[in-house]
Amino acid sequence: MRAACDDIIRLLFVQALRRLFSRPDAVPSWLAGLSDLPVARALGAVHADPGRPWRLGELAAIAGQSRSAFSGRFTSCVGMAPIAYAARWRLRLAAKELATSSMAIGTIASRAGYQSDSAFHAAFRRETGPDAGGIQARSPGQSRMVGAHQQGGGQRAVTSSGVGK
């Protein structure tokens, strides 16, 4: 009986979301994009492989549409162009990694699909405001390689207080 009730609640929730996003005055968002099958396919691809350097033609092919038709449809549903969405999604995932892991910024940048740390830092600053190094989670007294501080041919660790060791 409990399983049947859970299934009914799920169905009602899905129906409510469908009704909400099928209204002509629905707010564009990635959630609204999920209600449009071609856009949902492209969103699924971007979310499955966020570090990939997506091109409009690739996403349009996944959606089964021409580039111009897909771009217009995606922008209408999601509220931004497909490549801008992919870039923003990558940076959001990178911000989460910066805040919750001890991975080096260069590693996070590479996983997010950036070829260089400087390109990552510039895109991150443009999207979020603060520098990527300022977001990175630090616990008190923890030493971690935050930047490439060259001194005497080696790197020196920077603690959460910013003082080198």
Image: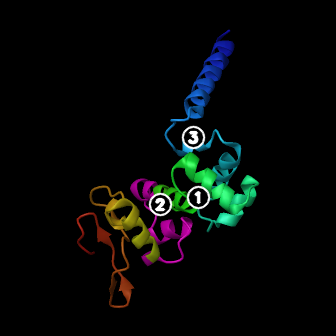
Image quarter hosting the C terminus = bottom left
Q: Position of residue 138 (x, y in %)?
A: 33, 58
Q: Amino acid at mark 1?
A: Pro
**Which is more foreground, mark 3 or mark 2?**
3
Q: Which residue is painted at 55% across and 48% down in the image?
A: 78
**Which is more foreground, mark 2 or mark 1?**
1
Q: Which residue is mark 1?
A: 82
Residue 121 quadrant: bottom left
Can residue 36 be seen in the rendering of this structure?
yes
Q: Are marks 3 and 2 in contact (CB under 8 Å)?
A: no
**Dot 2 alpha-carbon crowd within 10 angstroms: few under 14, some 14 to 19, many 20 or more:** many
Q: Position of residue 103 (x, y in %)?
A: 46, 64
Q: Are marks 2 and 1 in contact (CB under 8 Å)?
A: no
Magenta segment: does it hold 62?
Answer: no
Q: Is residue 25 above or below residue 102?
A: above
Q: Position of residue 7 (x, y in %)?
A: 67, 19
**Kind of element beneath mark 2:** helix
